[in-house]
Image: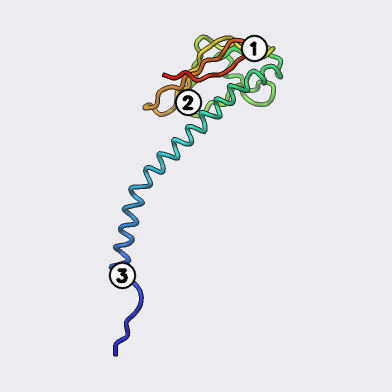
Amino acid sequence: MRGTAAGFTLLEMLFVLLIVGLLAGLIAPRFGYRMDRIERLSQRQELEDQIRQLPRRVRLAGRQIELPKDLAVANLGDGDPVLKIPAGWSIGFDPPLLIAVTGACSAASISLVLPEPDEPPVQFKVAELSCELSPVTP
C-alpha cells in the first residue's frame, strides 16, 4: 500500500505566486495614486484652514498683513510663518488680500495651484470684512 503525501506541489505553489504577483502588479499603482490624491486633499484642507485662521492670528499679533507681499514673513508673532505652503504648491491673490489689525479683510480671490499639472487650480473668494472663505465652483 502506497501512502499519499498531503500538501502542494512546487508547480502549484509557483502558479499561485504568479497569480498573486499579477494581482499585486495591477492593484499597487492604483493604490499609490489614491494615496497621492489623499495626501494632496489633506494638504489642501490644511492650507484652507490656515487661511481661515489668518484673521485671528493677525488680530492676536497686532499687525496688518498684505498677501502675497507678506508671505515671506517667517514669524507672524506666534512663532509660525504667515502660511505654510506645501512644496510644489503656489498661491495667488487677486487683488492683494489685506487683513487689518482688527481682523477685517478686503475682498479678494485666492487661487491654489496644485503640483499636479493635470489638476485645475482651486479658487476661493474672501468676503470683505467678515473674511469668510467660500469656494468658487467652475
State the image quarter where residue 130 is shown. top right
Circle 3: residue type: Leu
Q: Marks 2/3: CA distance?
A: 52 Å
According to the picture, the residue beneath numbered tag 3 turns out to be 10
Task: Classify 114 as above or below 7.
Answer: above
Question: Circle 3 sits in a helix, a strand or a loop, which is it?
Answer: helix
Residue at x 32% of width, y 85% of height: 3
Q: Nearer the viewer, mark 1 or mark 3?
A: 1
Is 58 situated left or right of 123 in this image? right
Q: Residue at coordinates 41% horizontally, 42% vertically from top-left?
A: 32
Compute the Cα span from label 1 to label 3. Answer: 73 Å
Q: Nearer the viewer, residue 133 or 31?
A: 133
Instruction: Report how far apart the C-alphas of labels 2 and 1 lie in the structure.
Output: 26 Å
Q: Are marks 2 and 3 in contact (CB under 8 Å)?
A: no
Residue located beneath label 1 in the image: 104
Q: Look at mark 2 in the image and give the residue it sits on.
A: 89
Q: Quadrant of residue 115?
A: top left
Residue 98 horizontal/vertical position (percent):
59, 11
